[in-house]
Amino acid sequence: MFEKKMEFSKSYVVMVIVFFINFFHGGFCFTTFVFGDSLVDAGNNDYIFTLSKADSPPYGIDFKPSGGQPTGRFTNGRTISDIIGEYLGAKSFPPPFLAPISTQSDTIIYKGINYASGASGILDETGLLFLGRISLREQVKNFEESRNAMVKVKGENETMEVLKNSIFSLTVGSNDIINYIQPSIPFLQTNKPSPSDYLDHMISNLTVHLKRLHALGARKFVVVGVGPLGCIPFVRAIHFVTNEKCLEEVNQLIETYNFRLNGAVDQLNLEFGLSTMFIYANSYAVFTKIIVNYRQYGFVNAKQPCCVGYFPPFICYKDQNQSSSSFLCEDRSKYVFWDAYHPTEAANIIIAKELLDGDETITSPINIRQLYAYRL
């Protein structure tokens, strides 16, 4: 009975979305508030003391707005959220919250803000070994600070009007999983909960933060699942996977997490009704398809990173004389992975397009373009 009710609710939502797209689309700016980890960090970690930084070459080598200089993005070019914003008409990218420009109310209204932080996670303790990072809890608090600044200038009503039609994206959870599956450090070793309990703990904490954002005025959410971490170079290296295969036990754990996360998103839609829209973005399916069929997408390598060091944590860097790096591939567009953790811009473009216009197997109950057009 519950499943039938949920299916009916989803179908009804999609019909309503189509109505709004047909009659009200067009003429509004794209404002987005980005939360998450290094997959979408636009430079917040440049402003804190942390071991998780992307502030030196060759990071940003293909990022045209900076002339190829590092911006704090953990890739060679644009992130997925950057690319989606461009496709939806954004003329510039949301600045990092810690950048001075982010305090200006017009910036908040017309661009949004990026709160993401490398090494961060859903759980406060995630990323401890990297020292500084801005947990999801703190990111939400930072958004509240931005909101208060908007209210002082624009008032509560206009602020709510902006927020209810802005997109709030959360790309987080990968570091929580990595922390759980990586080998324990003896002097920091603690008793691990069971995998099931740990995943439930992640989802319950994420749900709390989503509801807090809703209470602050967010109405349009993109909740991104965790990708196939069993295939990233770092995880394969620390588990001594020498063949071309991914680490299946890690991917199975992530599949379980994503299944539960999708269910939590469905439940939130039922709880808040048509005044709010949560969509689940299945990055796992998109990225797995790229890895399995990488040659069809024009890649030549889907296992090794383009830029990487030779020992853990396999940091990508360029030496002081700027003539060489730890290792940098000749053609960055032919590699799926930029470094040991993150995709190249070329892979990000494919992922962004799929999430933007994908069917219900990729984003549900609607895709990101439809969410953008959905007027509340």
Image (tube, rainbow, N blue to C red):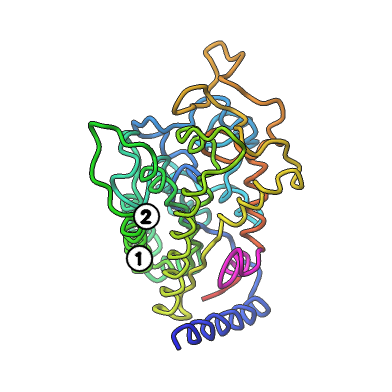
Place residue 283 in its image quadrant.
bottom right
Task: Please state the horizontal and vertical placement of residue 14, each as a whole percent of the image.
Answer: 59, 79
Q: Residue furthest bottom?
A: 1
Q: Secondary structure at mark 1?
A: loop
| Amino acid at pointer 1 | Leu
Task: Please state the horizontal and vertical placement of residue 89, each as a whole percent of the image.
Answer: 65, 56
Lateral position of residue 132 relative to residue 235, left or right: left
Residue ID at (60%, 21%): 327
Q: CA gap, disc 1 to disc 2?
A: 9 Å
Residue ID at (42%, 51%): 173
Count of all numbered marks drawn on residues in the image: 2
**Which residue is at the front of the view, 321 or 362?**
362
Residue 310: mark in rendering: none
**Which residue is at the front of the view, 76 or 296?**
296
Residue 216: mark in rendering: 1
Quick one: label 2, few (<14), some, or many (20+) residues within 10 Å?
A: many
The residue beneath circle 2 is 143
Q: Which residues are magenta?
A: 358-372
| Amino acid at pointer 2 | Phe
Q: Is residue 367 magenta?
A: yes
Q: Is residue 80 magenta?
A: no
- Residue 350 vertical position relative to residue 241 in the rendered view, above or below: below
Residue ID at (49%, 35%): 234
Q: Residue furthest top?
A: 321
Q: Are marks 1 and 2 in contact (CB under 8 Å)?
A: yes
Q: Secondary structure at mark 2?
A: helix
**Which residue is at the front of the view, 294 or 362?**
294
Place residue 325 in its image quadrant.
top right
Task: Please state the horizontal and vertical placement of residue 200, each as a whole percent of the image.
Answer: 34, 61
